[in-house]
Amino acid sequence: MAGSHVQQGRARQAQVADRVAAKVADVLRADATFESGSVALSARIAGAAAAAIVDLPVSVRRELSKRQGELTRRIRGLVESFSDAPDGGKIALEIPKAVEPSKGEGLGKIATAEEGERLLDELAVARKLEDWAGPVAGANELQRDFGIARSTLNRWQHAGEVIALLKGTRKHVYPIEQFIDGRPAKGIGTIAALVSNQRVAWLWLSQPNPMLGGRRPINLLQQDHADEVVDAAQTDFSAQ
């Protein structure tokens, strides 16, 4: 009698496993042309499995829970069988028999170096340094207004710790925003070392940067966020 009950229980479990597997198979077939991610597909499979057992008697569900391994093996075997399809799960692409090569428009007429310079001169617009660099000051003004000694400024410049912009042919001026409490903001020297051109370095520091959420790097240096600015600069300039 006991053996009969055991056999009946196993038969019911096998029926439930087959029922769940059939539901999962339906989901997989339905999703064959459905562009869903693995999470969405897993959720649909789980939902199908739940739908297959939710209306079963409590006693059957308890018996099934004792032998989850069997159910797992059946579902895994079913899922793996889909990868054994004759087409290997590949998507057939319709390839045209003839492809017309694209010739493009070509490079056009190649200009000489002299012609290129002439065309650039026509497009170039003269701008004052202060128009794009913002407020700047020479060594005398920095000593007078900020107490920065000329010798100290020269030492910073030779050590690459400040941004110095050439104004005219010989005079250097210094963007005022780079100084905090009479000293270069932390990180200025690192940026200057990454960017060999001082004008490019200051343009980068003074313009809104998408990598920094649209904020200006120099403003972040003023707020003592040098690490964040240096990381962005390394991303922009290290490959150059």
Image (cartoon, rainbow, N blue to C red):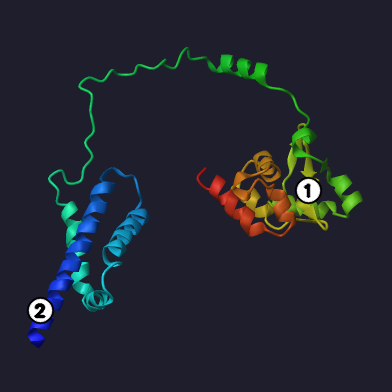
Callout 1, which amino acid?
A: Glu
Q: Is residue 76 visible?
A: no
Residue 183 vs residue 15, the one in the foreground: 15
Image height of 125 relative to 13, above or below = above
Residue with the mark numbered 2: 7
Callout 2, which amino acid?
A: Gln
Asked if disc 2 and disc 1 are in contact, CB closer than 8 Å, the reply is no
Q: Position of residue 71 (x, y in %)?
A: 21, 69
Image height of 118 relative to 196, above or below = above
Residue 120 is drawn in which quadrant? top right
**Dot 1 lies on which element?**
helix
Residue 160 vs residue 54, the one in the foreground: 54
Q: Is residue 197 left or right of residue 80?
A: right
Q: Residue at x 17, y 61 (%)?
A: 77
- Location of the N terminus by quadrant is bottom left
Tag of residue 128: none
Tag of residue 177: 1
Dot 2: few (<14), some (14–19), or many (≥20) neighbours within 10 Å?
few
Residue 213 vs residue 154, the one in the foreground: 213
Dot 1: few (<14), some (14–19), or many (≥20) neighbours within 10 Å?
some
Q: Position of residue 123 (x, y in %)?
A: 66, 19
Residue 124 is drawn in which quadrant? top right
Mark 2 and mark 1: Cα distance apart in space:
85 Å
Q: Is residue 221 left or right of residue 114?
A: right
Q: Residue at x 14, y 76 (%)?
A: 10
Image height of 203 relative to 78, above or below = above
Q: Position of residue 133 (x, y in %)?
A: 75, 38
Nearer to us of marks 2 and 1 is 2
**Dot 2 lies on which element?**
helix
Q: Is residue 22 visible?
A: yes
Q: Is residue 145 left or right of residue 169?
A: right
